[in-house]
Amino acid sequence: MQQLISPLTAPFADPASLESLAAVYAYPDQVNHGQPWLRANMVSGLDGGAKLDGLSEGLSGDADKRIFGVLRALADVVLVGAETVRAEGYRPGRARADFAAARRAAGQQPAPAIAVVTRSLELDLTAPLFTEPLVRTVVVTTADAPPERLRAAAEVADVVLAGRGSVDLRSAVASLAERGWTRLLSEGGPRLLGQLAAEGLLDELCLSLAPLITAGDAPRIIHDAEMPDVQQMRLVSLIEQKGFLFTRYLRPPTP
């Protein structure tokens, strides 16, 4: 890490350290009082593409993966769309020794739960995400989802019903917060992030910008969503490393 610019916090001597990154990306105090905070972590190329060869992995680098791990280590639950679960081969969250004491002190479980958002329940329930989780995986779906698939999902995961016809994300976030999971992290994909933004649920965006021009037909990090208005965001930190930029934007407080 070469430089850290943070308008809201004091500079850190070693922004490459886990301690420094955890301080930069700390959740606000409101999460300790039962109020959820939803941040998204995404990566894109310079031309806005959110994938390379069909996956986000090709856009990542060592520092991006380090920040990815820190964001997970701070979160109570990770929201991810079923399409991304299938494409990226999602696995359960893992416990990290470096964050074990802090998670215990905050009353968190050893690892974040993974919450899969899906209307169709087209999931591989034999995958490690469902058979090997340290914290039981959550499936967020609709009340009118296929009954047989609902029953099968309930055998290997906790099921949260939110909405009919399509997942009611506002209700889903409220249900997760009722479990005490107020530190929410979305890892996409672009459609899920678009829906969260359109619903006004996105409090924070952590965007990694890779020094790559990818072209092709990859979606943007927010895709296929109609928003009622342009949403202004406020830059609060910026880290640069080998041409990669790691940004953190907050939604301005409501007047």
Image (tube, helix red, strand yellow):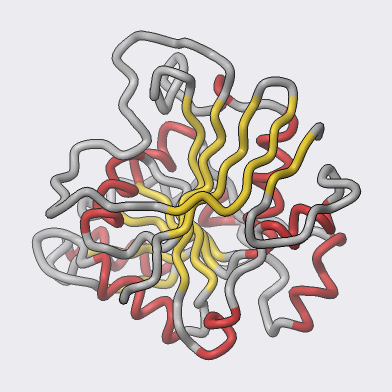
**Nearest the eye: 103 or 130:** 103
| Residue 111 in the image: above or below residue 218 | below
The image shows residue 224 at horizontal and vertical percentages of: 19, 38
Image mark count:
0
Q: Is residue 31 left or right of residue 156?
A: right
Q: Is residue 199 above or below residue 229?
A: below
Residue 237 or residue 104, whichever sits in front: 237
Q: Residue at x 51, y 77 (%)?
A: 181
Q: Provide residue 192's location: percent of width, then percent of height.
A: 31, 48
Q: Position of residue 51 (x, y in %)?
A: 43, 23
Which image quarter: residue 58?
A: top right
Image quarter (top left, top right, bottom left or bottom right) of the N terminus: top right
Residue farthest toward the right in the current orientation of the protein? 13
Kindly indicate the quadrant of the structure image that contains residue 108. Answer: bottom right
Quick check: 50 left or right of 121?
right
Q: Most extreme residue toward the bottom, as rendered?
A: 33
Residue 131: where, in percent of width, then height? 56, 56
Instruction: Please state, as top left, top right, bottom left or bottom right, where the C terminus lies in the image.
Output: bottom left
Residue 40 visible in image: no
- Residue 40, compared with residue 163, is above or below; it is above
Horizontal arrangement in the rendering, residue 238 relative to residue 33 (left or right)? right
Q: Is residue 88 visible?
A: yes
Task: Tell me the residue at 75%/53% (across/down).
Answer: 21
Residue at x 34%, y 20% (from the top left corner): 218
Q: Residue at x 31, y 71 (%)?
A: 172
